[in-house]
Amino acid sequence: MGKQQDILHVQGLRTSFFTDNGIVPAVDDINFSIHKGEILGIVGESGCGKSVTSLSIMGLLPQAGKIVGGEIFFQGESLTKATEKRMRSIRGNEIAMIFQEPMTSLNPLFKIGNQLTEAIHTHQSCSKEKARKRNIEMLELVGLPRAEQLLNDYPHQLSGGMRQRVMIAMSMICEPQLLIADEPTTALDVTIQKQILQLMKELNRKLHTSIMMITHDLGVVAEVCDRVVVMYAGKIVEEAPVRTLFKHALHPYTKGLLASVPDIRSKKDRLQSIPGNVPKPGSIDKGCRFAERCEHAMERCFVEDPPLYKMETNQQVRCFLYDTETKKEASHETTIT
Amino acid sequence: MGAYAVRRVFMLLPVLFGMSLLVFSIIYLIPGNPAQIILGQRATAEAIAEVEKQLGLDQPWHIQYVDYIGSLLQGDLGTSIKTDVPISQEIFPYLAATVELTIVAMVIAIFIGVNAGIISAWFHNSWFDYTAMVFALIGVSMPIFWLGLMEQYIFSVQLDWLPSTGRYEASSVIDPITHLYLVDTLIQGNMEQFTDVAKHLVLPGIALATIPMAIIARMTRSSMLEVMRSDYIRTARAKGLTNFWVVYKHSLKNAVIPVLTVIGLQTGLLLGGAILTETIFGWPGIGRYIYDAIQYRDYPVIQSGILLIATIFVFINVIVDLLYALIDPRIDYK
Ligand SMILES: Nc1ncnc2c1ncn2[C@@H]1O[C@H](COP(=O)(O)OP(=O)(O)OP(=O)(O)O)[C@@H](O)[C@H]1O
Ligand code: SF4
Ligand SMILES: [Mg+2]
């Protein structure tokens, strides 16, 4: 079980999809914790299992998806063993979630006020007037002008940035301890992105809400996160405090990602700097999943699964380069040449 | 919204105009002299002239049409040749009978169809889903007159649970107010008659409900499946809402929009008078009325009957459009 100050503790989580084409292990043995008041970044390329991880925590996996191993603890309570009723009382109340697509994440047929009030009334009983006040308060908190009128607006009358602010207001309305944000800014243009990130950081400071920030953008990580988990093909390959990661990343994959950061700004595809593609989940049964694309790959990388190595720098890395045995060999080789 | 409704109705004018022209020309489209056809081969010249005058056939056609429209606008639907009674008076009880049956059938169809569609979508690919969809397939392809006959055989003849024909027991007399007998008996507080009328509605109601129910169930299912995949449904679930609210508030309101079209269309079709069903169940509805008029070559009745049904059909379409606008705020009706 997690330490006392951990709000969330994910332990050996495995989530698979049972499809017509076989079992897809989308998330494979994931371990991480989120401390109280912390913003944890989860980074990785498309398809590496970020969303599946967050949906596993929320208990909102699509029908084909199942948690097949491990456990998730929220404030010491097991979510994987919780009843659906208990999960409902946690969702939106203690753990809230916002999504990538602000344009489609609000129900088009109901007024903003209705959707906000619903978020309150699902978990608390209070008068209509009180709920209304709370709605206005939240809309103002997320920096939306003329909040009172907004309550009577429908989602289609708002811009993408405004809708995402409404989503944030809605997710924070019950003051959850943990907010899961699945690529909250990906669909927005750059200036709005910055504002939304700023807002989330502010809320984190003001309300002490822990945030799990899912992104494939290291720029976002640099801007708001305290600590980062890097995922690759369903596994965690590196975990580090943000500054450490940007100063000296250890895993070859992380290094590749970092090397391509300037490309994000110039709108070039960031994946190009690492040659090759992410392997499909389940397509590799042994060895390091990054081996095909890794320039440091050794023989054992193709046969053995690298474990997570704990480093003195508060970092963890899944790579044989950091095995003390390998290191000796490597240094031996360099002395010969 | 009100202005939109008015405008939408105004837009009907050309349609109604076209329909009246079409119905008016029925009499010219049939070969031969209409008066002769009405009266038969052995009619005297005087009798033919009399009927021609009654129908206004002695006038040039454009004068006839202007007269026709003029009287229609005054609510005059002409006079039945067979009974010599103004059609506007005569037609009402028949129309009411069809309306009552249609409402009952559509309530059954919507209630069962929509819910079956929802459950099928929610338990997608389950045994319920498969069973419901097989039934829906049978439902749309079932000959309704056959279903009607089977119903009568099982529930009236064999089990003797329900009456097989008519709107009420011949021995009882209902004072018509609206001619919707469920309403009339209720207003008069005569529960015995009310039950009797309700019983008479069951078998024809179910027979007529079958096709719309099957179509509505399929439509609801596919529409719900699509809506349930959408982002805002994930949001609703992430809020901690129960499945009930996710389905009946967030999903259904979105999913019902395409279903409305089907409901409108099917209601219009039933109101058109299902002649076969009405015949089997001895239902004195508008379908029967027009059918009888055709047998008797009662042209004014045929014309007015068709025009009335077509008008109702068109108005149902307008109502569906207005419902769209009411449900979906994105529809710009300015
Ligand atoms: N409904 C599903 N059915 C089958 N497999 C799925 C399903 N959803 C996800 N997966 C599998 O899980 C893997 C991880 O998906 P996930 O959505 O978590 O990726 P992600 O990291 O969030 O990517 P993105 O950046 O594109 O959002 C995918 O590669 C896919 O193979
Ligand atoms: S384990 Fe081997 S293949 Fe994998 S990242 Fe490290 S060096 Fe590269
Ligand atoms: Mg994702």
Image (spheres, coloured by chain):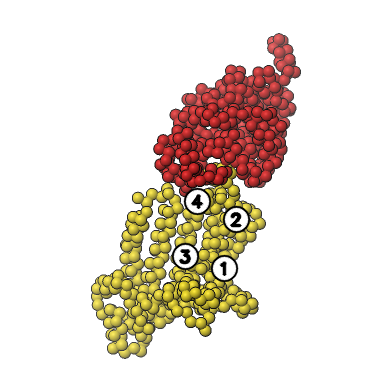
Q: Quadrant of residue B162?
A: bottom right
Q: Nearer the viewer, mark 3 or mark 1?
A: 3
Q: At label 4, which amino acid type do we have?
A: Asn
Q: Decide: few, some or many residues near mark 1? Use Cα within 10 Å; few <14, some 14-19, many ≥20.
A: few
Q: Label 4 vs label 2: CA separation? A: 16 Å
- Chain in red, by letter, is A
Gap in angstroms between the C-alphas marked 2 and 3: 23 Å
Label whose residue precedes the other's in the sequence (1 or 4): 1
- Discs 2 and 3 share one subunit: yes
Judging from the image, mark 1 belongs to the subunit labelled B
Nearest to N terminus: mark 4 or mark 3: 4
One can see residue A275 in this view: no
Quarter of the image where the N terminus of chain B is located:
bottom left
The residue that label 3 is drawn on is B267
Q: Is the CB atom of the residue marked by disc 3 within 8 angstroms of ligand 1's nearest atom?
A: no
Residue B256 in view in this figure: yes
Mark 1 against mark 4, which lies toward the viewer?
A: 4
* Disc marking residue B153: none
Mark 3, Cα crowd under 10 Å, few <14 / some 14-19 / many 20+, is many
Q: Which mark is residue B119?
A: 2
Q: Secondary structure at mark 1?
A: loop
Chain seen in yellow: B
Give SS at disc 2: helix
What residue is pinned by disc 1?
B142
Residue A57, position as x, y percentages in the image:
63, 38
Crowd tier of the residue under label 2, counting other residues whose Cα lies within 10 Å: few below 14, some 14–19, many 20 or above: some
Find the distance from the CA under tag 1 to the CA under tag 4. Answer: 30 Å
